[in-house]
Amino acid sequence: MKNRIYDTILTPYEKEMDREKPWDIYPRPQMKRDSYLSLNGLWDFAIKESPKLTAEYGEKILVPFPPESYLSGIERRVPKNSYLLYRRFFTLPEDFIKNSLLLHFGAVDQECEVYINGRKAGVNKGGYIPFSFDITNLVVNGENEISVIARDTLSKKYTYGKQKDKRGGMWYTPVSGIWQSVWLESLPEKPILSIKVEPDLKKVKITVKTEAEKKRLTLKSDGSIYEFTEDSIVIEPAGARNWSPEDPYLYDFALETESDRIESYFALRTLEIKEIDGRERMCLNGEPYFFSGLLDQGYFPDGIFLPATPKGYEDDILAAKRLGFNMLRKHIKIEPMVFYHLCDKLGMVVFQDMVNNSSYSFILDTALPTVGFKKAHGTLRHRDKETRDIFLSEMEKTAALLYNTPSVCLYTIFNEGWGQFLPDEAYRKLRLIDSSRFIDATSGWFYGKESDLDSRHIYFKTPSINKPNGRPFYLSEFGGFSLRIDGHLFGEKNYGYSIYRDKESFTEAVYDLYVNGTAELIKAGLSATVYTQLTDVEDETNGLITYDRKVVKIDEKKMRAANNALYSEHKRVTKR
């Protein structure tokens, strides 16, 4: 009998999942090479008190799902300080290795050691960023053994987001070990190591990191060929078409050298802040644009951190668009790159949060600020240098990972003071890394001096702008109204603001909040909103959609009308 975490509710994608080859999709859409071997599927698995590799596993786990999840086949919590042992065997296809062989992990939470045929391949710490090891000299002809020793102590030194050992309320079931795809890739001599895409409205600069001298880029839209030997090239497509949620146009291209070839894409779009009608406004492609979004936490009841198939992400994005939204605030979680590709392709702006580390205090970080005590953290909290350095390092890795992604338009550094320290310094550091996107240094409260936006969380009352600071006003969280739908609940507990009993009253409350409250702020400088939230998450029943993705709780036509009221008012005020 398993120690069940909860009475599992399942998404529609669970039945569609290929259990022999789960998540068998190329994991890196913007640098796709004709070399890919998925290692997802059933692995030998054990939870042990010792990190010693063993021949006795006793269980099977379905990778890439974490052991806490229903989809993994394990579905139980991992005792604190335990070690997760994974093992599987693989045989490389004939002539798979060209020159070198890389082993990729999308994410492993929180620390891991990786072995090939009993020899160490490498170590990684941190649970959200992809990593890889060169295992060329560790593999043999015929069968190979891969072993992973993972451990998740929920150490506050590393980024952990909304995972908590004692879940409940706004804190959720933690995940451990492998939770994204594991795959192999063969590289040729002098491979293309990376590309950097820097667009504007008419052209794009593409910088290529490779030792190869001759490069050829073929633009698939019109077959144009660009040959170059420098590190970078500027391309100006004929009849430039700009990316937006209304027209998410992507320029596909192939990049070749004498030995290597990748496929990728770029989009032409710009982000800036301009003074419009006496107010600072957020602009997309040179024009004032209103970003109406939903808080998107990326949790699923059967896979926790991962949907059963990528369609789970696609349907979330399309559902948000049907409801009239053009943006998702990806809240304190970094998704597989497939998610961001879908946002690029389908036309959904992403406001991306950095993942917090360090300690959290309900009194200091939530309760007091909610009732008005919002003095800046400054240097008073989170002084540990190692913890700070880890956060800044993860912030830098996140920005590098998502740099080429056109849908990502804003970064949030600190949310509600969680782990916040020296926000002005963090802002300046991120601005040096990426000057092309909006940066919300302090979302909610504890404002510093440097940030692109006046970002506030307003719950329990009609949103208003008191003491405007001249920046575009960003209502980065509001709403949170709760409606429970029987048969689609995670458990008996309920967490949300303003409880409603039926779809009609819930819909009217949300509609009124938008049309008779929020829209009035646009004239005063409101440029973006984030309603809490896209779906229910565990105890939280404040989503517009149930946790299992089976019921849309709000009247779709009325929600679209509410969003259209914002867009129309913004257009009127900015005279577009």
Image (cartoon, rainbow, N blue to C red):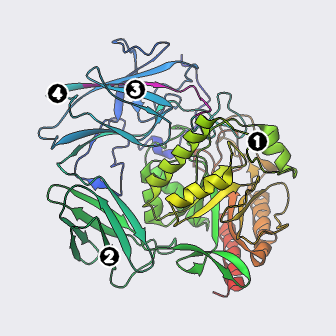
Q: Earlier in the sequence, mark 2 or mark 4?
A: 4
Q: Is residue 490 above or below residue 56?
A: below
Quarter of the image where one finds residue 403: bottom left
Q: Earlier in the sequence, mark 1 or mark 2?
A: 2
Q: Quadrant of residue 256?
A: bottom left
Q: CA distance from mark 4 to mark 1?
A: 54 Å
Most foreground residue, 215 or 379: 379
Quadrant of the drawing holding the N terminus:
top right
**Quadrant of the rendering where the C terminus is positioned:** bottom right
Q: Earlier in the sequence, mark 3 or mark 1?
A: 3
Confirm or deny contact between disc 2 and disc 4 (CB under 8 A). no
* Tag 3: amino acid: Glu
Based on the picture, tell me whether residue 154 belongs to the magenta stretch: yes
What's the residue at 18%, 34% (across, down)? 92
Mark 3 or mark 2, which has the lower sequence index?
Answer: 3
Range covered by the magenta-colored residues: 145-157
Cα distance between the residues tagged 1 and 2: 48 Å
Q: CA distance from mark 3 to mark 1?
A: 35 Å
Q: Locate residue 147, reporting x and y percent.
A: 34, 24
Residue 306 shows in this picture: yes
x then y, percent, for residue 323 = 61, 65
- The amino acid pointed to by label 4 is Val
Mark drawn on residue 113: 3
Disc 1 residue crowd, few under 14, some 14–19, many 20+, Cα 10 Å = few
Residue in the picture at 48% in, 19% down: 83
Residue picked out by circle 4: 140
| Residue under pointer 1 | 380
Q: Amino acid at mark 2?
A: Ile
Residue at 75%, 68% in the rendered image: 514
Give how far across and how far down residue 77 sits, in percent: 57, 24
Locate residue 2 relative to residue 485 in the image: left or right: left
